[in-house]
Amino acid sequence: MKSLDDALWALIERAPSPPAVESVALGQALGRVLAESVAAPFDVPAFDNSQMDGYAVRLADLQADASGNTSPLPIGARIAAGDPLTTLPPESVARIFTGAPIPAGADAVIMQEQAALQPDGRVVFSAIPPLGENIRPRGGDLATGQTVLSAGIRLSAADLGLLASVGHPAVRVYKPLRVAVFSSGNELRQPGQALGSGQIYDSNRPMVMGLVAGLGCEVSDLGCLPDRFEVTRDALAAAAQDHDIILTCGGVSVGEEDHIKAAVQDQGELDLWKVAIKPGRPFAHGRIGQAHFMGMPGNPVSAWVTFVLLVRPFVLKASGLADPMPEAVWLQAGFDWPKPDSRQEFLRAWIDDEGRVGIHAKQNSQLLSSVSGSRGLVEIPAKTPIQKGDQVRYFGYPGLLT
């Protein structure tokens, strides 16, 4: 059997080149993968500006008396955000507001709470500030030519704001991958249909479609494949004509009713792996024409685990993401796992109120409630018993689903 790391790196090496590039408006770019690095065309901020409402002063003009208050100074200017740059008159202060440009000659801003306006219109301050106090310097965030965002990241809402701050109305991103999703099995019925004897509802397809959509792909629901070789072969061949990736659940084992394996081999090429993880041992990767194929196990939890640990990194790499690997944190175990499997295990888990990892009471690979009722996966290394207080790797779902 392949280890998880070996299977993951094998998939990453097989990932195709990123798709074509297009330019989209910032309003449509959330979650898209940046195709080209962006550099700042000017300093941000573009001018020294006030960090708060107060008074712009020239420190050389401030003289403190025995009580610590400064001598009164007249207000020589009033500067609001959006006003043009001006010069501070000698031996005066400027009333200034947040975001307004610092007048030439001023070298600090005193907050208005430390100022007292005199009846004659002059102002007295209760403290003398240090040089540069409450001034946002030009280029303090970004300097001209500095890389704002690097190619190969998924754009967040904060990234879109950053791009807007340097004047970009649009951005170059990779086109979304086209992903076809099938389920398979004569025992499956769709929600809303009546169940007959020995039948179950198809939970894998809507789950996988949601996972794929969360990665920013265009998803096609291509239905449930019956346990018939010819129908399966023709459906996969048709999907390969206009999709980049084909995903299935079930049907890739060696049973007499597992026709997906034979259908892929008939139309293209297939590598069938036994990955040393629990749940999720059977996994397939192959090609049908120009489309990549990945087959996950049929048990719902096994499909979930193999998707987030194997399929997701492959899809993200093919989408142009520079670093598609799952991220984990090390935390203390809040549970005992005295009888480990010979395979690497991934238990449905969460972080408890004490910051330790707790696990769901139900860990069977058929029980989807353990996924819905958890917030991440905790890794149990092969043949390694875990006691409370041991350090374990925890993969939170937020980092595995986007």
Image (cartoon, rainbow, N blue to C red):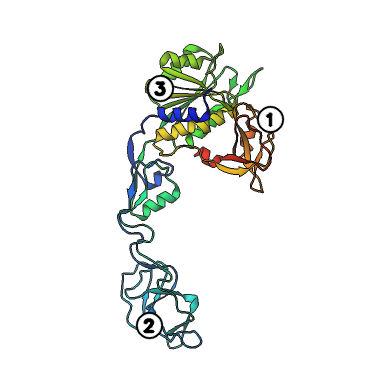
Determine whether label 1 and label 2 are within 8 Å by CB: no
SS class, disc 3: helix
Q: Which residue is mark 2?
A: 61
Q: Position of residue 170 (x, y in %)?
A: 34, 47
Q: Amino acid at mark 1?
A: Lys
Q: Residue at x 33, y 76 (%)?
A: 105
Determine whether label 3 and label 2 are within 8 Å by CB: no
Q: Which residue is mark 1?
A: 339
Q: Amino acid at mark 2?
A: Asp
Upstream in sequence: badge 1 or badge 3: 3
Q: Between 340 and 227, which is closer to the camera in this rendering?
A: 340
Q: Residue at x 45, y 23 (%)?
A: 293
Residue at mark 3 to residue at mark 2: CA–CA distance: 76 Å
Q: Which residue is mark 3?
A: 240
362 above or below 28? above
Upstream in sequence: badge 1 or badge 2: 2
Q: Nearer the viewer, mark 3 or mark 2?
A: 2
